[in-house]
Image (cartoon, rainbow, N blue to C red):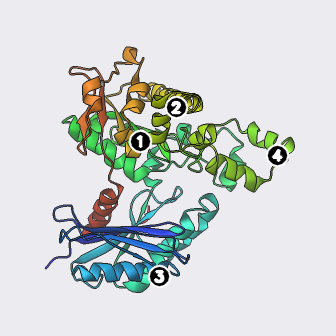
Amino acid sequence: MSATRVLVLNSGSSSVKYQLLDMSDGSRLAAGLVERIGEESSRLKHSPLATGGENRESEGRIADHEAALKAVAEELSRDGLGLDSPELAAIGHRVVHGGRKFTRPTVVDDAVLAEIERLIPVAPLHNPANLTGIRTAQALRPDLPQVAVFDTAFHTTMPESAARYAIDVKTADEHRIRRYGFHGTSHAYVSRKAAELLGRAPEDVNVIVLHLGNGASASAVEGGRCVDTSMGLTPLEGLVMGTRSGDVDPAVIFHLMRVGEMSTDEIDTLLNKKSGLLGLCGDNDMREIRRRIDGGGADASPAQLAFDIYIHRLKKYIGAYYAVLGRVDAVVFTAGVGENAAPVREAAIAGLDALGLAVDGGLNAVRSDAPRLISPEGARVAVAVVPTDEELEIAHQTYALVQDGNAGAA
């Protein structure tokens, strides 16, 4: 029996998300989440999708990632899907930062682990947790290929004119300062699915992808290759996000240090965790912001301003990437806000008729889990909603790599 299953792991600092997929047909066999690892009230949620059974949930202390993965293995075993199954082909790991070296999925060895660790200074919140997940999985199944799929890999095709910041080259190179971009697995998956929706090959299509979740990023994809993206050295740059500021004058930081007497850590926390929609109106959930706007009254005014700033930034990036690409075949919305917030999509495209962009109100209002067009029939540029599936993309890349037997790193 050939091994066709891939376990996808997304290890955070205190959580592990997982999905088990059968790559013979792309079906999901199980999915779940372990959260609050290391706390007394850790929680495991498990969905036995293959059996159609009831979801299971348990609480109690899960001390570390090793204990978390062992708990996940036990849940999978209850469904007859244990990690010791000969049908398991590989474990695919989401790794946030791969720097310039990792341009494609990579089978993990000691050298790969060392390089991921070397990149911790540019991804201090993410790479350590990703490493922990890989090492724990290695300990549980040392015989199984562990594959790292990097958020940054899809963006390594950017030309230097897009990837370089206009600072002293020697300083930039010494400290690895450049635009790396993130959400790459999502942008890769969505841009390819958008081409399929248009009935064309990815290499024949130019797409602007708007990945709008609590974290948000835009990309310009030319013929299947990323040529620009909004996030930079870190996921802070670019669009207005749930709690991140996105683009800001760098001198704001110096001003806060000198005049506000704030420390580096305080400014870091401000821009990453207390800014964006949350900082503007006290809410980082677009659903709540729209509820406040639609409800009217005094509570609506700050919510409306936050919404307007969010949309203004979106429009700027759509226009900028239209100019970068020269020809645009589709603008595609994805992720939690992009897939579900019709008012965001409508407002972001409103007034862009001269660019061939428009939204059909009826189509935009439809709720669906399927890829779909929301532009009027015959529109010069398609506007689409394509639900992202980062886990499936990681599984596809992982399975393709182990099937090809290609363990190259770059």
- Does residue 210 appear to the left or right of 49 in the view shown? right
Q: Which is nearer the N-term, disc 2 or disc 1?
A: 2
At mark 1, the secondary structure is helix
Residue at the extreme left:
1
Mark 4 residue crowding within 10 angstroms, few (<14) / some (14–19) / many (20+): some
Q: Residue under label 2, please give it.
A: 307
Tell me how far mark 4 sits from mark 1, CA to CA: 34 Å
Residue beneath the point at 49% across and 74% down: 42
Q: Which is nearer the N-term, disc 4 or disc 1?
A: 4
Q: Which of marks 3 and 1 is in front?
A: 1
Please state the horizontal and vertical placement of residue 158, each as a whole percent of the image.
47, 43
Q: Residue under label 3, please give it.
A: 66
Residue beneath the point at 38% across and 62% down: 105
Q: Which is nearer the N-term, disc 3 or disc 4?
A: 3
Please state the horizontal and vertical placement of residue 299, each as a whole percent of the image.
57, 33
Q: Which is nearer the N-term, disc 2 or disc 3?
A: 3
Q: Residue under label 4, please give it.
A: 257
Residue at the extreme top:
354
Tell me how far mark 2 sits from mark 3, CA to CA: 42 Å
Q: Which is nearer the N-term, disc 3 or disc 1?
A: 3
Amino acid tagged 4:
Met
Amino acid tagged 3:
Glu
Q: Are marks 2 and 1 in contact (CB under 8 Å)?
A: no
Q: Residue under label 1, please give it.
A: 337
* Residue 267 visible somewhere in the drawing: yes
Residue 51 higher or lower than 282, as above or below = below
**Quarter of the view holding residue 150:** bottom left
Tell me how far mark 2 sits from mark 4, CA to CA: 29 Å
Amino acid tagged 1:
Val
Q: Which of marks 4 and 1 is in front?
A: 1
Tell me how far mark 3 sits from mark 1, CA to CA: 33 Å
